Image: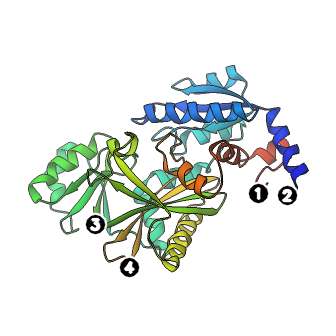
Amino acid sequence: MNNKRSEDIRGDFRKKRIGVLMGGMSSERKISLRTGEAVINALHERGYSAVPVDVNSNTAGSLQKNNIDVAFIALHGTLGEDGTIQGLLEISGIPYTGSSVLASALAMNKAASKKIFSYHGLPTPAFQSFHVNEDEVSQLQNQITIPLPFIIKPSEEGSTIGISIIEKQEHVTEGIKKALQNNGEIIIEEFIHGRELTVGILNGQPLPLIEIRPKSGFYDYRSKYMSGETEYIISPDVDRKKTDSIQNLAVQAFNALGCSGVARVDFILSSRGVNPYILEINTIPGMTETSLLPMAAKRAGIDFNSLVENILCGATNYKIKYGKDCKNR
């Protein structure tokens, strides 16, 4: 797209009122508020009219009150990243950033997304999923066929909330109960020793690899969001052929779930450095000072404000409503 056409489209967006949906009611509310604040600042610096919309039980009323033309979704976790807010926006006729209702729901549910990865022949650690309540915990232990060590985690949470690495049988009950604090579906997943890698996807194109090296040895909530707790290696020491393979797998996973706009695909590269395994897809990656997507974008020559603008310009259904397409500008 030529520069004049690109500027015309950006000018069209600047005539719209952008609502940055942030906060929410999930366990990741604090992180969402930080993401939302960073996004609003970036949009203001680029000349857009952006206002915060704190998502709560009266979000429909807040959208109407703020007279939003386009929604920039800066929510994380349930009731924000799982297709629910996307459905509300569809009903309200408001274009929004990121993936559609279905893709968001599939990516948020780790069991569903892993089943789709498996269907498409994409590598993912062996797993079992269970719907269970606390009264059934003892019975569940007898149904686990994944050998130790394994991971127990909620099917629908992010930021490693509710996750446990289980190395001894006597810790299984505790791990299940921890995962059940968030929802009734849990995943038992093969634990693979190796290097943690992530690939950002922007408008269907992969960004540079990032390797994650938490000082604690486990990339938990503190490691993710406390500055200095984790070392991030951008374009790590992975040979070109393997890098291309991982980036290609990331795009395949993105497409398999029908994602759009921006996402981040997390991998584990086995300790022998041979086999990469897809762990999950985040359809609304964090945009804080320690977030991975902005790091990768910067290495690719995309500064933070440009990244935010690119995400905005990929708003779902924008063309349908306003007759102009800002994608691939």
Label 3 vs 2, first from the N-terminus:
2
- Amino acid identity at mark 2: Met
- Total count of labels: 4
Q: Residues within 10 Å of mark 2 (few under 14, many from 20)?
A: few
Disc sitting over residue 1 in the figure: 2
CA distance separating discs 2 and 1: 7 Å
CA distance separating discs 4 and 2: 39 Å
Callout 4: SS: loop
Q: Residues within 10 Å of mark 4 (few under 14, many from 20)?
A: few
290 or 320: which is nearer to us? 290
Residue that mark 3 sits on: 190
Residue that mark 1 sits on: 328
Label 4 vs 1, first from the N-terminus:
4
Note whether 133 is above or below 37 in the view shown: below
Q: Residues within 10 Å of mark 1 (few under 14, many from 20)?
A: few
- Amino acid identity at mark 1: Asn
Disc sitting over residue 274 in the figure: 4
Label 3 vs 1, first from the N-terminus:
3
Residue 105 x, y percent position in the rendering: 51, 50
Residue 248 x, y percent position in the rendering: 56, 72
CA distance separating discs 3 and 2: 45 Å
- Amino acid identity at mark 4: Val
Instruction: Let me know if residue 315 appears in the view.
Output: no
Q: Do the CB atoms of the residues marked 3 and 2 lie less than 8 Å apart?
A: no
Question: Image point 15% across, 50% down: which residue?
Answer: 173
Q: Do the CB atoms of the residues marked 2 and 1 lie less than 8 Å apart?
A: yes
Q: Do the CB atoms of the residues marked 4 and 2 lie less than 8 Å apart?
A: no
Q: Residues within 10 Å of mark 3 (few under 14, many from 20)?
A: some
Question: Image point 38% across, 45% down: which residue?
Answer: 224
Residue 126 x, y percent position in the rendering: 32, 69
Q: Which quarter of the figure is the N terminus placed in?
A: bottom right
